[in-house]
Image: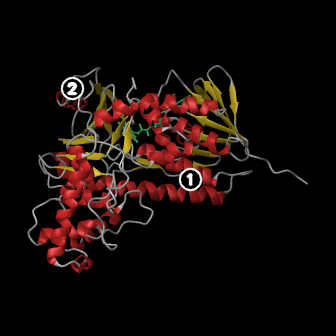
Amino acid sequence: MQTEPGIRKLVIVGGGTAGWIAAAAFARLLGERLEITLVESDAIGTVGVGEATIPQIIRLNSILGFDEHDFVRQTQGTFKLGIEFVGWSAPGSRYLHTFGDTGINLGNVHFHHYWRRHAMAGGKESLWDYSLHQRAADQNRFGKLERVGNTPMTGLAYAYHFDASLYARYLRAYAEKLGVTRQEGTIESVERDGESGDVTAVVLASGERVEGDFFIDCSGFRSLLLGQELGVDYSDWSHWLPCDRAMAVPSERLPDLPPYTRATARTAGWQWRIPLQHRTGNGHVYSSNFISDDEAADTLVANLDTPALDDPRPIRFTTGHRKQFWAHNVVALGLASGFLEPLESTSIHLIQSNVSRLIELFPRSVVREEDRAEYNRRTLAEFAQIRDFLILHYHRTDREDTEFWRYCKHMNVPESLTRKIELFAASGRLGRDVDDLFREASWVQVMLGQGITPADYNPMADRLEATQLGQFMGDVRRLVEKAVSGLPTHADYVAQHCGVAG
Ligand SMILES: Cc1cc2nc3c(=O)[nH]c(=O)nc-3n(C[C@H](O)[C@H](O)[C@H](O)COP(=O)(O)OP(=O)(O)OC[C@H]3O[C@@H](n4cnc5c(N)ncnc54)[C@H](O)[C@@H]3O)c2cc1C
């Protein structure tokens, strides 16, 4: 009997966030059958940004078995309840895209339909007046709250901010403990099988060869294996997501440690503010068609909330993705696979979800076209869903004060997004895909926050009498205020449970 050729040697190219997440997850879940080597180049380094996350990371941490407080402490991390968007729908506007539900969903009807009915009858409160996350963010409070008392109101959903280099170090320590071999060196060439075209080895500047049966390309924007070596083209989405550069600069710590990321619209892009324990991460993401690098750097520095700790560092990118994410025996993860800009902190999530998809479809003996096609199909669908959510922020705006915003407001957008906007504007309903990363509550907040007011609401919200509705809305507000008043401040929570000295 002939034995099937097995896939035994896994080589991960790159030691940024993508490389070390892949190494940690593969070592944890397939470590018994794979010999894993990660190659990274100290001379090239990592992109060094990527410090805000979304709640799905909690699942990754739990698969890896991380202790949450230890993880936050070691990465100088903080907790994140959402993203505050300042100036996006109009100069001076502001809303929080929170991670959790708002109010209480009743009888299979989302809370925003009750809120809309209440507003159409004269209620003056905004949806966010009923949001636990918003009220906690307003007061810089954070605590663990799964549910509000014994009511149906769900508690605080959260993610983390962390220092990207400490995060990579944390993952590396974990992966090495599980047997991953780290090989330092710069890859200078790639060897391939003459017949199949599969990659067989990477060759370092030292002349050393690292052989593999399967390769994960985490080489960052270079896309060394998938893009450069295998020649897989890039699908450019910059006509929809026109920002193509960023300036990043750290500044001193924010004393109140706000439990949220802030994204402030600027004349040709937006500026992020990410509170960490030891410093604040800041960056200006912009379109080079509308503003020069010098102007972008000046805008960033002029708008810091705390003194800068360094000079702004430029980063260039093109929004979009590789036309295939898996070709031959190479899968690209992280920036090597594409980049959708950091507005909703989705890149680390994409690494995580693609790693889990790859593990689910990972070949035992030979790479099969069926697995590859399925991986490529599902990954592209996920990129496209996130793309639409991001475009919504730029496109649905009343801003016409600069050329950049006029471009965004009047650009053609994918039909899949137009359909969602029109449905929501008409009825408050969401036509989201069942497997969409962003939940209904997220779409609702961003649609409303960007200035879309639904003309109607779900008729099932009429099942409450008018007086019952008034009572319900009042009860929700009181519950929110009471729950929030019982939470510690975020700074106290961090200092007590995961402060660096704690
Ligand atoms: C401006 C900006 C802001 C961002 N903000 C966020 C955010 O808030 N949240 C989020 O989730 N994501 C964010 N991201 C994305 C996030 O930074 C990346 O997804 C994440 O850092 C993963 O990067 P990476 O590992 O793919 O690439 P990199 O960090 O660039 O790592 C590439 C690795 O490949 C190695 N390498 C390259 N070439 C060679 C070679 N020839 N030989 C050997 N090794 C090589 C490098 O040494 C390095 O180790 C942001 C990205 C940008 C550009």
303 relative to 391, above or below: above
Q: Nearer the viewer, mark 2 or mark 1?
A: 2
313 relative to 415, above or below: above
Instruction: Kindly identify which numbered label has been placed on residue 368.
Output: none
* Screen quadrant of the N terminus: bottom right
* Screen quadrant of the C terminus: top left
Residue placed under numbered mark 2 in the picture = 306
Residue 453 in view here: no
Quadrant in which ligand 1 is drawn = top left
> Could you say whether the residue bearing mark 2 is in a helix, strand or loop?
loop
Counting from the top left corner in percent of width and height, residue 255 is at: 23, 28
Counting from the top left corner in percent of width and height, residue 84 is at: 24, 45
Counting from the top left corner in percent of width and height, residue 351 is at: 49, 45
Does the residue tagged 2 have its C-beta within 8 Å of any atom of ligand 1?
Answer: no
Does the residue tagged 1 have its C-beta within 8 Å of any atom of ligand 1?
Answer: no
> Could you say whether the residue bearing mark 1 is in a helix, strand or loop?
helix
* Residue positioned 35% across, 65% down in the render: 416
Q: Nearer the viewer, residue 146 or 229?
A: 146
Q: Quadrant of residue 254?
A: top left
Q: How many marks?
A: 2
What amino acid type should be assigned to the residue bearing mark 1?
Answer: Arg
* Residue positioned 26% across, 24% down in the render: 252
Counting from the top left corner in percent of width and height, residue 405 is at: 18, 49
| Other-residue count near label 2 (Cα within 10 Å), few / some / many at <14 / 14–19 / ≥20 | some
Residue 384 in view here: yes
Q: Nearer the viewer, residue 421 or 369?
A: 421
Instruction: Kindly identify which numbered label has been placed on residue 357.
Output: 1
What amino acid type should be assigned to the residue bearing mark 2?
Answer: Thr
Whole-Å distance between the Cαs marked 2 and 1? 41 Å
**Farthest residue toward the right?**
1
